[in-house]
Image (spheres, helix red, strand yellow):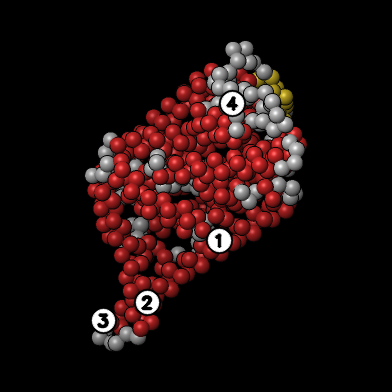
């Protein structure tokens, strides 16, 4: 089916400044409303996971706090977030980043001249990188995605002209690389345990260790200290005490080293995770897949297979974690393979196909419209989430104080706040505050902020047949 979507239905107040140069900020006519809807949903979903890492020690992002009940509401929200949302909302957001990059580059290349499109594109990413540093070091969110998105985004421009098939082949290669690296790390950990336990046994039997065995033992003991449930809880309790007794400047100093490690070592070990989803987004946008131009049967098949793979692998992983009470040492010994990225890609694509199918149904499309302004203000809402949660958990001293399920009360309150404010804000303004700042810096000219009083435009038909 095709539908003519009006600005009042799907893009309330998100008009853009008329192009005064060869290349200017995106016009409303160029936007695909569905992307904004899904971006808004994904952004709110990301907060489910981010809140777990910012409200308590990062150990409990995946694991449960052994000082709290492991049954009842805590158990069910852990199952919900890990089984349904973990990695998938970030995956959707990454796919949409890749899709949006294609729209941006394609439009600029067609309307720009010479090096101007590349100049604007890379300047845009440099400012995104800068905001990522602010988000991590000033707003105190060590799980920031803007910084790694910018770094990986630099690599997209050279691949902009590849066919969807070649982009998907590139994504598969990155998936294979990531899966190989994860399994290599898993078996390196297994080897550390095996060699360390052997050296430990020799020491117990009063046998002299070689220099190599002595090194194996030290490495194992260091690994064991942080990998066991007891070691994890010891560090977590110390972190809760440290955070709740620190002022803002002390918090900045505390997270400085953590952020530096995440934005260097962690990024080095996970860049393919982001880039493969960017490639998928580029391919799906270029092929018309995201616009719903493929058959219903194809979307349904991918949805069923992808979600089945994701839920199946998640069930095995969560059962392993819970039965071992989140003791990483035991889990490493029992886990045969690491299939995280395969699970995440399958589940994410499955969700995307479900959303595309639902968007074909008019009643669901109207529900989706609620989230479009949230997606149009995704940059502002993402940074605002960091600011709000930092104030609540660091400023008000709630860090580590709430039960896992109680954190979701805060999440829901932020959801409601951002849905309401985004819908109201875009009735009067063209952009969110941070979007306006980002665009003004990118195009090196102050963008008009106020929305024209009579800016009711009709957007050309968006085919979701």
Closer to the camera: disc 4 or disc 3?
4
Name the side, left or right, on which 465 lies relative to 177: right
Reading the image, the residue beneath label 1 is 179
Judging depth in this view, the residue of 446 and 124 nearest the camera is 446
Reading the image, the residue beneath label 4 is 447
Q: Earlier in the sequence, mark 2 or mark 1?
A: 1
Calculate the distance from the C-alpha at mark 2 to the C-alpha at mark 3. Answer: 15 Å
Q: Residue at x 66, y 26 (%)?
A: 28
Which quadrant, please, contains the N terminus?
A: top right
Calculate the distance from the C-alpha at mark 4 to the C-alpha at mark 2. Answer: 60 Å
Q: Residue at x 73, y 36 (%)?
A: 112
Reading the image, the residue beneath label 2 is 216
Q: What element carries label 2?
A: helix
Which quadrant, please, contains the C terminus?
A: top right
Q: Crowdedness of circle 3 by 10 Å Cα count: few (<14), some, many (20+)?
A: few
Name the side, left or right, on which 357 lies relative to 337: right
Q: Can residue 224 be seen in this view?
A: yes
Q: Is residue 128 above or below residue 196?
A: above
Calculate the distance from the C-alpha at mark 3 to the C-alpha at mark 1. Answer: 37 Å
From the top left corner, tell me how far across and down residue 54 is, in percent. 37, 43
């Amino acid at each position: 089916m095709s539908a003519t979507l009006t600005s009042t239905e799907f893009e309330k107040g998100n008009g853009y400044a008329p192009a005064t140069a060869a290349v200017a900020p995106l016009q409303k006519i160029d936007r695909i409303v569905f992307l904004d809807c899904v971006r808004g949903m994904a952004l709110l979903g990301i907060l489910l996971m981010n809140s777990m890492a910012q409200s308590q020690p990062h150990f409990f992002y995946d694991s449960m706090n052994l000082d709290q009940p492991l049954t009842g509401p805590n158990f069910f929200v852990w199952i919900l977030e890990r089984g349904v949302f973990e990695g998938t909302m970030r995956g959707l957001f990454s796919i949409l980043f890749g899709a949006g990059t294609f729209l941006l580059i394609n439009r600029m290349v067609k309307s720009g001249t010479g090096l101007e499109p590349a100049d604007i594109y890379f300047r845009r990413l440099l400012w995104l990188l800068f905001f990522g540093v602010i988000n991590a070091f000033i707003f105190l969110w060590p799980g920031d995605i803007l910084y790694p998105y910018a770094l990986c985004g630099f690599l997209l421009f050279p691949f902009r002209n590849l066919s969807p098939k070649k982009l998907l082949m590139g994504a598969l290669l990155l998936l294979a690389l990531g899966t190989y690296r994860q399994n290599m790390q898993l078996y390196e950990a297994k080897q550390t345990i095996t060699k360390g336990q052997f050296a430990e046994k020799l020491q117990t039997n009063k046998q002299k260790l070689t220099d190599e065995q002595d090194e194996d033992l030290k490495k194992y003991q260091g690994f064991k200290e942080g990998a066991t449930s007891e070691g994890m809880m010891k560090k977590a309790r110390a972190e809760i005490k440290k955070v709740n007794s620190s002022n803002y400047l002390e918090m900045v100093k505390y997270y400085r080293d953590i952020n530096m490690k995440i934005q260097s070592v962690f990024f080095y070990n996970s860049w393919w995770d982001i880039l493969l989803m960017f490639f998928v987004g580029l391919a799906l946008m270029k092929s018309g897949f995201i616009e719903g131009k493929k058959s219903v049967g194809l979307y349904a098949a991918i949805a069923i297979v992808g979600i089945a793979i994701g839920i199946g692998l998640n069930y095995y992983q969560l059962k392993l974690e819970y039965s071992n009470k989140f003791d990483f040492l035991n889990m490493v010994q029992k886990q045969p393979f690491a299939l995280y990225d395969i699970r995440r890609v399958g589940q994410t694509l499955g969700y995307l196909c479900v959303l595309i199918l639902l968007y074909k149904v008019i009643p669901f499309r109207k529900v989706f419209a609620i989230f479009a302004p949230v997606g149009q203000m995704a940059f502002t809402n993402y940074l605002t989430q960091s600011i709000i949660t930092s104030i609540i958990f660091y400023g008000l001293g709630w860090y580590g104080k709430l039960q896992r399920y109680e954190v979701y009360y805060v999440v829901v309150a932020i959801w409601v706040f951002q849905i309401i404010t985004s819908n109201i804000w875009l009735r009067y303004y063209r952009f969110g505050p941070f979007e306006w700042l980002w665009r003004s810096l990118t195009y090196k000219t102050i963008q008009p902020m106020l929305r024209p009083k009579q800016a009711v435009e009709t957007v050309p038909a968006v085919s979701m047949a």
